[in-house]
Every structure is written in C-alpha cells, then in structure tokens.
Amino acid sequence: MISELDLTTLLAQPESDRCERTESVNKTDKFAEAICAFANDLANHRLPGYLIIGARADGTLSGLQVTDELLLNLAAIRADGNVLPQPAMNVAKFSLAGGDVAVVEVLPADLPPVRYKGRVHVRVGPRQAVANEQEERILAERRGSSILTFDAQPCPEASLTDLGIGQFAAYRAEAVDAETIAANRRTIEEQLASLRFYEPLAARPTYAGILVFGRRPRYFLAGAYAQYLKFPGVSYVDLPQDQAEVLGDLPTVVLELAGRLKLLITTALVQVSMMQQKLQPDYPEAALRELLMNAIMHKNYQSTSPIRLYGFADRIEIQNAGGLYGEANRDNFPTRNTYRNPVIAEAMKSLGFVNRYGFGVQRAQELLAQNGNPPAVFEFDPHSVKVTVYKARLHSDPA
C-alpha cells in the first residue's frame, strides 16, 4: 500500500491515468468503474492506480471521516462478482491534516481486459471511458507475456473448431453488456479473446475455452470429468448402488452433478413441537452445492484425476485434484483465497453457478449448522482437497 508521504505527493499532483479523486462516499458504480480501469492499465505502466475518496479534484481534502462501513464496502467490490476477473487491490484509511481519506490501491491485471458489469473501462489521462474495440484488442493481446494460470494458457493441440460457438454466443449475452454486443464488429476470435477463451498471439483456444465450450474437453484434458458413486453402506468396499462418469463441457458437468446431488438427499417428517411437524432433509442441498462448486472451481485441471462425488449411508465426500493454492493454507482457510483458475471462476459467476467469491465455504458451514449437520470436515494434502459432510440425525431417525 502507498505510504502517507507518497499519498501527500499524489494529492498535490493533477489527476492522471493512475489517480482519481472523489468526494463521494456512496457511488459504488463510480468506484467499481475506476477500479476496473486501473486494473486494465491501458497505458501499460505496470504500476498501481489509486482511487482516493475524500479528496476534491484539486487535491484538497473534503473533511471526510472514513468509517469502517465505507472501508468494508470498498473491499467488497473485489468479491461481489461484478468486476471480472477479480482485481488485486488493497484498501486503507489515512488520517491527514485536513481530514480522512480512503485509498483503494489497484494492481494491474494479469488477465486483461477486466470488465465491470460486462463493460471494459479504461483511463486515458485523467479521463475514464468505456474501451473501444481497438483498446480491448490491445488489452487482450498484451496478456500473452503475463499469463500465470493454467486455464488462461493456450491449448496447443486445439483450434477454433473444437469450441461450440453457439454456446459461446449464449454465454456472451450473460457476460457482456447489451450495448457492447449491439455495437460489435469484431471477429469471433476477438470476441473469445476478450473474455480470455482464446489466446490471439498463439491463435489457439485457452484451456478455459476448452473446458467451458469445448466439444470434447476430455480429449485435451484427461481429468476433465467427474466420478459419481453412491454406496449402500459406509465403506468403499461395498458395491455401488449407482455410478456414473459425468462428461462434457463445464455447464453440462455442473448441471448433471447438481442433479445427482439431489439423489443423495432424503427427507423425513420430524416433530418440531407437540402440535407441529415439518419436512427436513438429512443434508441441505444448498450447502452441498456450494461445496461442489468450490471443488469444480479450484480443481487442478492439469491432473488426470476426476472430481469425485461419493455418497455413503452416513456421509457425502467431495474431492478435487489440487491442494491449497497461492495464499491459502491450513491456518487461514477458508478466509484467504487465491484462484487457481480465475477464468473458470469468472465463467461460473457469469453462468450463475456461484453468487459471490470467497464466501462459499462459510455459507455452506452456516447452512449445515442451521440444518443440524456437523461442520464439514476438510482434508488437505499437496495433491488434493477432500470435504466430508456427515448426515444430520433427524428426530425420526432410529437411535
């Protein structure tokens, strides 16, 4: 984060493509657009941009008192799923002689272009605007030298014909705002590249493109499938009652697994009071779904191991290849998170499979507690993460 001395120097300078000042404290759209523009770093400074709240355009302070609520609201912009892919940013309060300021420091994105509510915002000098097609093309082509994650890398064996373009058109309608689509004159390659499903320098689909829209994802990624087993007892040695290999593009796999989750849940009539009964499931479906989406989002797709969804008489197990990633470790999980697959995470948000980033595990634990289930148990090793959810003992269950 910027130092107080450097902040004072920045306030004394005119606004630029790395600095925006505002007196407003509740204009979330304006804040998010600025964050998006700084993340895109059109001028390619490769340096942070700064949104300073509590300062006038001339650099003088407005006398603002920065509250914890304001800081929390600013930090929440990162996780609410409207700025995609997620920006890397820091939020801090500074108490200066003329009042407080809240500063949002935004780092340049590794996977531009970044969108806010489907639009790419950029800064040209002190002016902020929606990017034109040429500016989007510049951002898309720039990321070739800075790709860090596997899902954004080009698949060398694949070509455009390996993608379902009709599926992409439906996805684009969810991920890009209607005005941008209506004004579109770009080739299909440029449209895919703008959403990180195609790498223009390599002229190949990315692995995310293969996973989300691929006609045959498992041909290119041997572990791009899920294994479903339902056992009659509590042991792996029992013969499964039901089993399936779930194949296909990511939306197909997600929807089929979500359907199979329902097969693992039973409902019983339980006594709430002397005069009242209610139907209660032995597992809350929404909690299982959150944990399943988490496994799909964080899977190491370079591994040949599938996602595993196993149901037993007393528990459900969900396992994905790939240990804890980035900043996440045993001590800070699940409050700290680094996305192994940021493009896949963005696609799952755009498709409506996840609502917010970084809160799925906490929400699942809350839902389990409300239903009377024990907390989900997580097991980590360098190569996988397994979560076990134990069945709730309903009042009608035999002792």
Image (cartoon, rainbow, N blue to C red):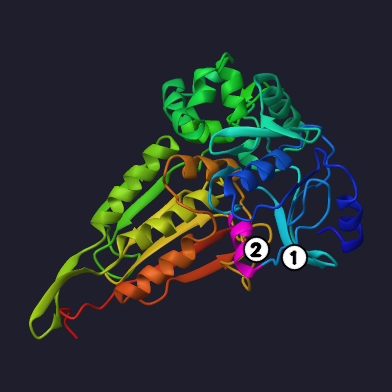
- Range shown magenta: 67-76
In the picture provided, is 181 more to the left or to the right than 129?
Answer: left
Q: Is residue 265 above or below residue 45?
A: below
**Does the residue at mark 2 contact the one at mark 1 (Cβ under 8 Å)?**
yes
Q: Position of residue 298 (x, y in %)?
A: 54, 52
* Camera-nearest residue between 130 and 26: 26
Dot 2: what SS? helix
Q: Residue at x 39, y 63 (%)?
A: 317
Residue 374 in percent (x, y) is at 37, 77
Choose the circle earlier in sequence order: 2 or 1: 2
Q: The residue under label 2 is which amino acid type?
A: Leu
Nearest to the observer: residue 32 or residue 268: 32
Taking the magenta stretch, the answer to whether it contains residue 85 is no
Residue density around tag 2, few if under 14, some if 14–19, many if 20 or more, within 10 Å: some
Residue holding disc 2? 71
Query: What is the CA distance from the residue labelled 2 to the residue labelled 1?
Result: 8 Å
Q: Read off the residue under disc 1.
A: 93
